[in-house]
Image (tube, rainbow, N blue to C red):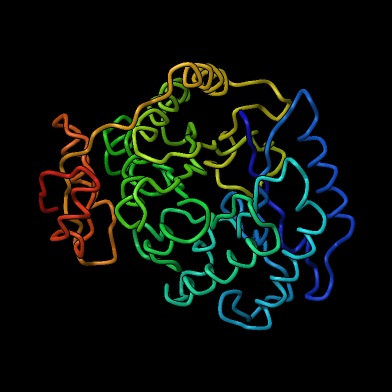
Amino acid sequence: MDHIRIRLLWPVFQPDPSVVNPAALERLCEFMDLADHPHVSLDVSDSVLDGWLSGLTFLPAWLSGRDMITDEDVIRTELTLFDVVAECIGDHRRFLGFDLGNELSAFNGEVPSESGDRWASLLLDHCKRITPGRFHVNGVDHRPWLEARTFSPTAAATYGSASVLHAHPYRTGATERYGPDGTGVLHLGEYLAELAEAFSPTRGRAKWLQDFGASPVERPAGTIPQWAASFTRNTLSSQGMWGCTWWSSHDIGRRFTGFADYEYDLGLFTVVNDIKPAGVRLRDLIRELRDTPVRPVDRRVGPILPESRRLGLQVADHFFTLVNQGVRPALVTHDKADDTAHLSARDITELVHC
């Protein structure tokens, strides 16, 4: 591994609109130094406005009844938090960049995507101003891509340093729809990457498979290592893949009883820091990929996405059918289907309808 993504739980770091917790900042600085230890050497992406983690919400009490995306006073408070954290770690050599927050659509689902897009643009621009040259992203889950929820797919594919992909077969419903070893489970990350490519104004824009994993709740534990390797390789077949980040580093201890069963065994390490088979397989895969990287595949066939902004798995079915036929497709948005220059730039020679 060469990087890690950490969560700054919002109520811990900003327990009051006017207070940023100095003890939390001190621990963050200590963590960054640990990441810089010669035996560690991990770049750190810091996810800041974290009100959602492992299926549970963690929101500041002072936010009750207020909207973090449309309330101007709340937005000013959020910007202050970024400013203070940037003063603490912005120049640290292990600071990769800011992630606005984890899967903000999970608890902001009623916010229109137009409002979400304006908010994401504002905050990402602010991150760029206060810590220029870093890798700043909006850590969206699958909902903006498949449902245009909170953020539009166009914004997710345009703002920030990379298009973020959270590709959990269980959470998206892919496991139930296709079966644990179905094409739609093995190639889900690839499908989301191609959605990001289709909506991006820039060919080959960076894409970060920021959150993926599997639990024994959804598939036999013994099959997880090979699934992890196949899923990673399939996703890396898309252009512009910046990196992949497994969720999560460690299992959750069973002494904590408040989580859904799915959440406990998602780690690459046990709670006592023993590496699990999936961790061994991914460690070996990283070595393989450093010697022989996955080459992006040619994608000549382009299914045309419907005009609807809801691009759920019923649309993905067409993509996976083509994969089953030996074709690795691109995806084309409806408004680009007649744009010959766009199609030529992407080397797409055949269009089909979803």
Q: Residue at x 22, y 38 (%)?
A: 299
Q: Nearest the camera: 229 or 159?
A: 159
- Of 129 and 51, nearer the camera is 129
Picture quadrant of residue 119: bottom right
- Give the residue at x 41% y 48%: 205
Q: In this rendered view, identify the residue nearer to me: 222 or 239.
A: 239
Asked if 102 appears above or below 16 in the picture, the reply is: above
Answer with left or right where residue 30 lies relative to residue 46: right
Q: Quadrant of the N terminus?
A: top right
**Residue 233, position in %: x, y?**
39, 28
Q: How many marks?
A: 0
Which of the pair 333/140 is nearer the observer?
Answer: 333
Residue 296 in the figure: left or right of residue 33: left
In the rendered image, residue 172, in percent from the top left (x then y), is placed at: 38, 49
Residue 300 vs 282, above or below: the answer is below
Q: Residue at x 41, y 57 (%)?
A: 157
Query: Is residue 136 found left or right of 171 in the rendered image?
Result: right
Which of the 4 quarters of the picture holds residue 83? Answer: bottom right
Q: Residue reaching furthest bottom? A: 72
Where is residue 168 drawn, in percent x and y?
A: 43, 43
Q: Residue at x 21, y 43 (%)?
A: 319
The location of residue 351, given as percent across then percent down, is: 11, 49
Residue 276 position (above or below residue 207) = above
